[in-house]
Image (cartoon, grey):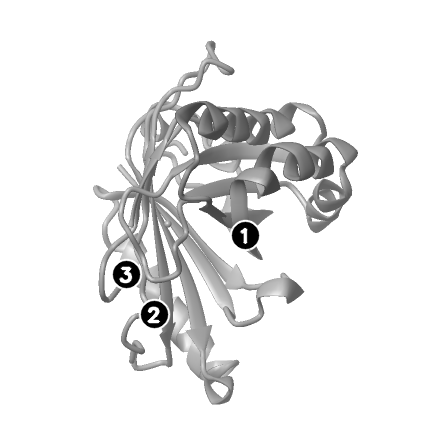
């Protein structure tokens, strides 16, 4: 599914398109976010209809070409929304603007991008939000933040049928540009988000082996990939997905 953002099948891919938002005039970001939902095991057996790529274009706070051996833990947050069919452009703009401004209402949010899914998908997700937090404690505070809860109540749920959240811990290079996803490499590009559901017997060794193989694959393409993160889904509300992965393409 394709997502156009001002501010993620096999079957059909999902694309989220990002473009600079007026709310961040000093640091405009133009990028794309591709979200896939997959179901499989170590041998990468995907259940038909469970892999959904998504591309998004939106403003984002955005690794440098310098790769440090030192690592820093971060927490990745993914939210997929199902907007109502009769959503107007003004209502969409209002929803995305308010979601985007949540980064200014609390500490701990170090990167953000969001936008509209541009292709139809079986789950009927229409918009996506990606955020990076410094710590799990920051993510917990985000879910309880009064401003964020107000945005959901007044500017998101009136326009949506529902949403799903997936969160996971990951490691990135221990330098400012990589942590905060800033710099020339994050000005443009494609962000691919993969949600995976491993069968229970594969959790642990087999799943970790599959994720490690994916990680080695991303490392093998430095000319194409700026940064990738992966980890176990921590969100109890979406345990049908066991893991998440985010890959930033140039």
Q: Which mark is residue 188?
A: none
Q: Which percent across, then down, holds residue 141?
A: 76, 43
Residue at 38 percent of width and 34 percent of height: 66
Residue at 30 percent of width and 76 percent of height: 46
Residue placed most toward the observer, 143 or 67: 143
Label 1 or label 3, whichever lies nearer to me, is: 1
Residue 178 in sight: yes
Residue placed most toward the observer, 76 or 11: 11
Label 2 or label 1, whichever lies nearer to me, is: 1
Residue 62 in sight: no
SS type, badge 3: helix
Q: In the displayed structure, would residue 104 be above or below residue 110?
A: above
Q: Answer yes or no: do the residues labelled 2 and 1 have beta carbons within 8 Å?
A: no
Q: Which percent across, then down, holds residue 165?
A: 56, 54
Q: Earlier in the sequence, mark 2 or mark 3?
A: 2
Report the residue marked by disc 2.
50
Residue placed most toward the observer, 145 or 161: 161
Residue at 44 percent of width and 77 percent of height: 198
Tell me if 158 is positioned left or right of 52 in this view.
Answer: right
Q: CA distance from mark 1 to mark 3?
A: 31 Å
Q: How many marks?
A: 3
Report the residue marked by disc 1.
163
SS type, badge 2: loop
Q: Quadrant of the C terminus?
A: top left
Q: Dot 1, crowdedness within 10 Å: few (<14), some or many (≥20)?
A: some
Residue at 49 percent of width and 47 percent of height: 81
SS type, badge 1: strand
Determine which quarter of the picture holds residue 55.
Answer: top left
């Amino acid at each position: 599914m394709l997502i156009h953002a001002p501010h993620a099948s096999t079957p059909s891919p999902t694309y989220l398109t990002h473009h600079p938002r007026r709310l961040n005039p000093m640091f405009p970001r133009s990028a794309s976010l591709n979200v896939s939902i997959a179901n499989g095991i170590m041998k990468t057996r995907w259940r038909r209809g469970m892999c959904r790529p998504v591309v998004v274009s939106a403003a984002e706070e955005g690794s440098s070409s310098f790769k440090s051996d030192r690592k820093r833990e971060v927490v990745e947050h993914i939210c997929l929304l199902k907007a109502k069919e009769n959503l107007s452009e003004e209502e969409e703009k209002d929803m995305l603007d308010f979601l985007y401004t949540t980064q200014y209402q609390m500490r701990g949010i170090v990167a953000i991008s969001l936008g509209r899914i541009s292709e139809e998908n079986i789950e009927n997700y229409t918009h996506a939000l990606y955020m990076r937090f410094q710590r799990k404690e920051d993510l917990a505070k985000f879910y309880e933040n009064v401003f964020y809860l107000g945005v959901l109540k007044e500017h998101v749920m009136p326009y949506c049928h529902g949403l799903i959240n997936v969160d996971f811990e990951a490691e990135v290079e221990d330098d400012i540009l990589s942590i905060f996803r800033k710099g020339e490499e994050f000005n443009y590009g494609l962000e691919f988000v993969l949600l995976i559901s491993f069968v229970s017997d594969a959790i642990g060794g087999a799943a970790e082996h599959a994720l490690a193989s994916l990680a080695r694959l991303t490392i093998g393409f430095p000319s194409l990939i700026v940064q990738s993160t992966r980890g176990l889904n921590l969100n109890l509300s979406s345990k049908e997905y066991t893991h998440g992965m985010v890959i930033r393409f140039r």
